[in-house]
Image (tube, rainbow, N blue to C red):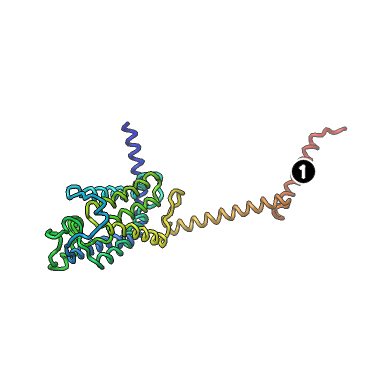
Amino acid sequence: MTIYIAREATKLWRKVSAETATELQLLLEKWKLLLAGLVFQYIHGVAARGVHYLHRPGPLLQDLGFMALPELGQRKAYLSESVFTFIFMSFVLWTFHPFIYHSKRFYTVLMWRRVLAFLVASQFLRIITFYSTQLPGPNYHCHEGSNLATLPPPQNVLEVLVINFPRGVNLGCGDLIFSSHMIFTLVFVRTYHKYGSNRLIKLFAWLMAIIQSLLIIASRKHYTVDVVVAWYTVNLVVFFVDKKLPEMPDRTNGLSLLPVAAKDKDGRMKEDLHKLEKDSRISDEFHKLLNGNTIDATDRRQRVQMNGKHGEDMNHTVSDATPTCT
């Protein structure tokens, strides 16, 4: 048993090491776009904190979702965050499965480059939307009388730039249309729907997205319009951005996307040319033989000489073997 575990651990380490080297090489090429996507996540957080200074509490707006779904209450508000955390962590782990599993369809670096492009485009539209009109927050800490419903004017710029994660994110007010939780959820679900391989998990992922939507409304973290707008906006953004981005290579065919060194590239080109020349020469000879033609004059002379020599040898052999009649 110990030998088996040691052997499997060695195989796993080789897979992880090989995949890490491959992904690092891609990361050296694509790091600028990845860094830009991560920086925009911080910008989105600063924008959400900034709109909190503009938020003014007021009576709740009339909402069909609030009428249809019973309120969970503050004690059960964690259900929405628990489902979102499950979706988020499941997707992150799935994107890193090429480091462990033998069968793999994509490169992790290219996958997150694509996902961040979807997130940035959706969040950019979200920032424009919630700064255009500030609605009274439906969440409990955003109601009138709450100390967190409004923030005092900032004393300096640093106070705005410090997001106070995660408390400042979870206790924000004013960043309503449209739901940030639904942006991440729908981007992750759509991405797995396209690049995932298990049909049951795809159906389960869409079911979780629906449950997440209902829990957000039931926990009064967003109005129903915030969730509805997220559903069609994010899907449209992902659809159009996906059309503009180059398609990721499919790794199931075993092709490599890694850049080749100049020497290796020249060597491979020479080998390919040599193979092509050899194949064309063999093909020409084959066609000439099928047509009844010899290959060239030198080959014909060589064959005649060889045939003549072979005939002479045969004559000598016959003459030596024939007895004289004296």
Is 230 situated left or right of 255 in this image?
A: left
Q: How many marks?
A: 1
The quadrant where residue 154 appears: bottom left
Pick the front one: 268 or 36: 36
Is 119 situated left or right of 318 in this image?
A: left
- Amino acid type of the residue tagged 1 in the rendering: Gly
Does any portion of residue 61 appear in the rendered image?
yes
The picture places residue 308, in percent across and down from the top left corner, at 76, 46
Location of the C terminus by quadrant is top right
Q: Residue furthest top?
A: 1
The picture places residue 59, in percent across and down from the top left corner, at 18, 61
Local secondary structure at mark 1 = helix
Mark 1 lies on residue: 311
Is 191 situated left or right of 316 in this image?
A: left
**Image height check: is 320 above or below 239?**
above
The picture places residue 304, in percent across and down from the top left corner, at 74, 49
The quadrant where residue 178 appears: bottom left
Is 324 situated left or right of 139 in this image?
A: right
The picture places residue 105, in percent across and down from the top left corner, at 41, 49
Mark 1, other Cα within 10 Å: few <14 / some 14–19 / many ≥20 = few
Pick the front one: 315 or 111: 111
Pick the front one: 19 or 276: 19
The quadrant where residue 222 appears: bottom left
Pick the front one: 324 or 52: 52
**Image height check: is 63 above or below 200?**
below
Location of the N terminus by quadrant is top left
Does any portion of residue 301 appear in the rendered image?
no
